[in-house]
Amino acid sequence: MLEAISPEGTFTPAQLKTIKDQAVEVTQMAAVQAGAAADVTIRPLTPQDWYQSGNTETAVFSNQVALSVASTLYSEVESAVPTATAYVLYGIGITYPTPQIQEIWIGTKAVTWARIRLTPLYVYGTGGSQTGVRRGYFNPIYFVSTVTPRLQYVSSGAVAQYGETYELIGLVADPSNNVVDQQPINKLQSATQAPAQ
């Protein structure tokens, strides 16, 4: 059940493309298994997709619960991608300089499908200062739309709620021709100006 993670820096560009292509294939397979037509739209997973229940929608992936005691397993509120046919997780990015989360467990309320130990990302290339986001990849884990995922954390120290950001790398299979959260366009807006939020 412990899933191996491999740092992004250990792959060639061709190998990274193979990993992403495999994730796309798994996403398409999961969508068909869920009863979708083969012509789904595959796009990257966003935090707004993942956190859609109550007031937990956020622009970043982060621990949704406070982690107060080291080496204790904490569960966050179950998440969902309500408009998707299926979705796949296949990687994670950790934020430096002071990451605290040591493991992320992925599953449902009843079953843990994978435990991702992040140590390989922490120790890879430790010769100098570590800044930014370090990414790693694991075997794709897929969910169909009727399954609600749960993340669990094991931390090396106390972390306030939303105190540690990270990146879940994944894909979403949307129904064909489905536009999610399309912002209205102001007819006076120039072509290069983003709409006001």
Image (cartoon, rainbow, N blue to C red):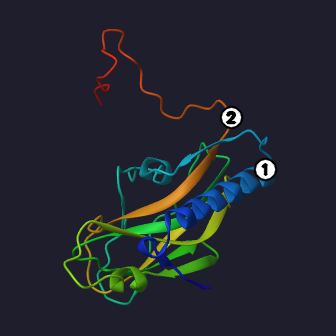
Return the x and y of residue 97 as percentages of the image width and height.
21, 74
Residue shown at the point (31%, 73%) measured from the top left: 66
Quarter placement of the N terminus: bottom right
Toward the viewer: 83 or 168?
168
Q: Which residue, given by chain and number where applicable, does mark 2 sit on? A: 176
Residue shown at the point (59%, 78%) measured from the top left: 114
SS for callout 2 = loop
Return the x and y of residue 181 as percentages of the image width and height.
48, 33
**Label number found at residue 32:** 1
User: How many angstroms separate mark 2 from mark 1 (CA)?
Assistant: 12 Å
Instruction: Tell me if mark 1 has few (under 14), some (14-19) or many (20+) residues whose alpha carbon lies within 10 angstroms of its own.
Output: some
Residue shown at the point (32%, 82%) measured from the top left: 125
Toward the viewer: 102 or 66?
102
Residue shown at the point (28%, 26%) measured from the top left: 196
Kind of residue indicated by mark 1: Val
Return the x and y of residue 186 as percentages of the image width and height.
35, 14
